[in-house]
Amino acid sequence: MESVLARLQVRERDRVRVARVDADDRPDLVQRLGVQEIPSIIMFQDRKRFACLRGRATLGDVERTLSERVEHEDPEARTG
């Protein structure tokens, strides 16, 4: 999971901010976010949660989720 987050941070540095939270250090945050499985990747836009990938996600899983969000937000992104 670390390598996925590191690659995402490099590839998408202009579009996303990546933050890692250690569940053992921040059980309050884990509870507040409703994390049910570790590891999880939770995605936010404008401070609102829009996706949660539970378990070991691949870089492709993350990129697919991000691109679906962009397409959902901007229909023109699909047609170019």
Image: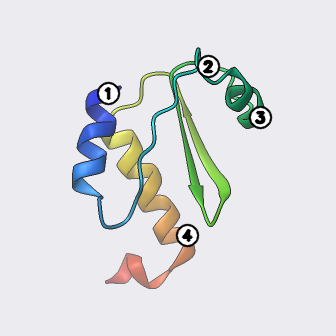
Residue at the disc numbered 4: 72
- Report the Cα–Cα distance between label 2 and label 4: 26 Å
Determine whether, in the image, residue 23 is placed left or right of residue 8. right
Q: Position of residue 69 (x, y in %)?
A: 52, 62
Percent coordinates x, y for residue 62 in the rendering: 40, 44
Residue beneath label 2, please?
37
For label 3, the crowd category at 10 Å Cα-Cα, with few meaning under 14, some 14 to 19 and many 20 or more, is: few
Q: Residue at x 36, y 82 (%)?
A: 79
Residue at (61% x, 19% y) in the render: 37
Where residue 60 sits: x, y (%)?
32, 42
Does 28 appear above or below 11? above
Q: Are marks 3 and 1 in contact (CB under 8 Å)?
A: no
Q: Mark 1 points at which residue?
A: 2
> Does dot 1 land on a helix, a strand or a loop?
helix
Return the residue at label 3.
Answer: 32
Q: Which of marks 2 and 1 is in front?
A: 1
**Depth order, front residue of 27/41:** 27
Q: Which mark is residue 23?
A: none
- For the residues labelled 3 and 2, the Cα–Cα distance comes to 14 Å
Is residue 57 rendered to the left or right of residue 59?
Answer: right
How is the protein colored in the picture? rainbow
Between 35 and 17, the one lying in front of the other is 17
Of marks 3 and 2, which one's residue comes earlier in the chain? Answer: 3
Q: What residue type is labelled 2?
A: Glu
Q: In this view, does 54 lie above or below 60?
A: above
Q: What residue type is labelled 4?
A: His
Which of disc 3 and disc 4 is earlier in sequence? 3
N-terminal-most mark, 2 or 1: 1
At label 1, the amino acid type is Glu
Q: Is mark 3 on a helix, strand or loop?
A: helix
Q: Which of marks 2 and 4 is nearer the N terminus?
A: 2
Q: Which of marks 3 and 1 is nearer the N terminus?
A: 1
